[in-house]
Image (tube, coloured by chain):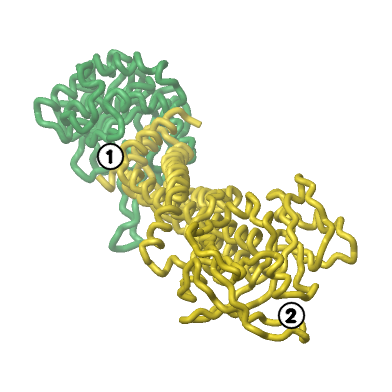
Chain colours: A green, B yellow
Amino acid sequence: MHPLEINNIFKSFKAVENRNEYITILSGISLTVETGKSVSIIGKSGTGKSTLLQIAGGLDKPTSGHVFCDGVDITTLNDSKASQFRNRKIGFIFQAHLLLDDFNALENVMIPALISGKSKKQVLDRAKMLLSDLALEDRMFHSTGTLSGGEKQRIAICRALINEPDIILADEPTGSLDEENALEVEELLLSQVKKENRSLLLVTHNIEFAEKCDYMYLLKNHNLELLREKN
Amino acid sequence: MNRFTFFWAVRKILRRSRLTGCMVLICLVTAPLVLALVFSSSMMAGITNKYIYLSNGHILVHGLSNIEPDKTNIIYVDTVISGSALAYSSDSTASFVIKGITNSYFNEQRQKQLTFITEENINQSNLSGITLSRKTAENLNVKIGDRIALMIVPDSSNSVVAPKIVRVNSLFYSGYDQLDENLAFVSYDYARTLFPSEESISTEILLSNSLMDKTNVITSNFNDNIKYSTWDQNNISVYQNFVTSRQMIIIILLLISCVAAYYSANIAQQMIQDDMVEIATVKLIGGSNKLIVASSFISVFTVTLLGVIIGFFLGLFISFNIGPFLSHLAESGISAFSYYLLDFDITIPYSDIFLVLSSLLIISVISIFISLRKTKRISPIQLFTSL
């Protein structure tokens, strides 16, 4: 069983101008992400990278095909089951940090664990450790409004890792950061994923970032093409 | 229920000014609701008591009676003579019921309902005395020591109609002018001369307060030949007005509480609209729809409940303090108050308050839940279209 196995995924939408016409976004995509490996997908805007990531995370349904996450076909799960599954098995990082403003940095990190039913006491140490690993120990009790973009994104990374998920899905995690912060977040994300032996599926425009992953794919003409494989 | 559910709900309560606003508004609705219920119930109870203690007692036995007080159920028994009269002063006229009473008539309970105004330095006179209400004295433009003429409405066809001169010995007021201006007191013996017919004699019976609505407990022991009527029968129009008024007040207050409940639901709806991104984020990181509904419900319902509780106590506080304030306004000459009873004991109608406030809360619960159904339609995928 792999953390993520995408089997022959097709995705098409009805055209806005002509409702009888379908626009194909993804056509027979298959991809496997192995434990502890990082995979990046690059491609031009509008080629369907984010759609593929959303299908991989159970946020969107494919027109046909299956997505297995730790052996479970997440395309067959209803909304409630999919939510529970995401909570335990998948960590998300997006271009927007999506932190909850009602909570401070430490609480934001703990939220997925609290949702899964763990007590504060059980997760406090791990949340503090993650924040320390990402150089945020002096920002733990700050409200999200007082943090910089880079700090917020690092908190989002901690939040994605708190439940020890099998796979992290990251969609342009450095897209909204300046070069210096982007580089820092890239390094921290990749090193933390390696340290915790998690798998990573990264979608990005940033080729330098993509090249740091174990596998780099190009999404072109609705399908994936392996560009590079690290030895 | 998940720990995060409460954690999130508490944060929303503390951080959302919209929720604080909701609590303040519910409080401002609840306080007048409680005030209206307490004030109307107390005033009705006050007026009822005035009628009972000053007019006919709990039970009025027609004619003389040998019923004796037992100090537990029947507290006081008083024989009275009553009849109608027209009064003439040099300036004006008035009509009222004259009640002939013995010295024991103004017992402790009746004295609580009245205030007497007397003057020590009035001239001695051979004229019989009368105690008028302050309102009647105002109408007749007389004061203590003045004389008025009474034209007695005869109680039998044999009586000769002739004016009687009496002197105003004292004044009374009960706080309820509408009752006061129809009542005057003379001594029992003098009343006997005014109304010699046996039909003018009656016996007023006062019961313990617990038997007020159970007069049949006492009357069921009466002999068949005793003719009697109870306080609600004697004052049927007043009694029916109170019953209808109370029902109308409760219906109006229920409608107001429906509007307040709808407001809570509206707040829940606006909160969902405001928190769309947060809700989608929580769903993204694994929060179920149940968790989101529960958390939003707890936050909105908690502020509604707090608003109701604070409003309840605020309403009680105002209720206990508004009487003297209104009396002061009435004394200062605002005529609108003069026909209202303003000095009454506050009685809290717990069952009515419970009915109105529990309706408010139940309707809130239902309408908040209906509003929160919309969270089901929020999908994490919206994060990518809305950002």
Q: Is residue B328 left or right of residue B161?
A: left
The residue that appears at 43% across and 46% down in the rendered structure is B314
Judge whether B77 appears above or below B378 on screen: below
Whether B254 is drawn above or below A29: the answer is below
- Residue B131 in the image: state x and y as whole percent: 57, 65
Amino acid type of the residue tagged 1 in the rendering: Ser
Q: Position of residue B67 (x, y in %)?
A: 82, 56
Task: Give the labeled residue for mark 1.
Answer: A50
Q: Among all residues in the image, which is located at the extreme right?
A: B224
Q: Is residue B341 above or below residue B291?
A: below
Q: Nearer the viewer, mark 2 or mark 1?
A: 2
Q: Secondary structure at mark 1?
A: helix
Q: Residue at x 47, y 30 (%)?
A: B2
Observer-nearest residue: B12 or B139?
A: B139
- Between residue A168 and residue A10, name the one nearer to us: A168
Give the CA separation, mark 2 to mark 1: 102 Å
Which residue is denoted by mark 2 in the rendering? B155
Circle 2: is it few (<14), some (14-19), or many (20+) Cα within 10 Å? some
Q: Position of residue A142 (x, y in %)?
A: 23, 25
Residue B62 visible at all? yes
- Residue B333 pos. (x, y %): 37, 66
Residue at the image point whose x is 71% and y is 59% from the top:
B58
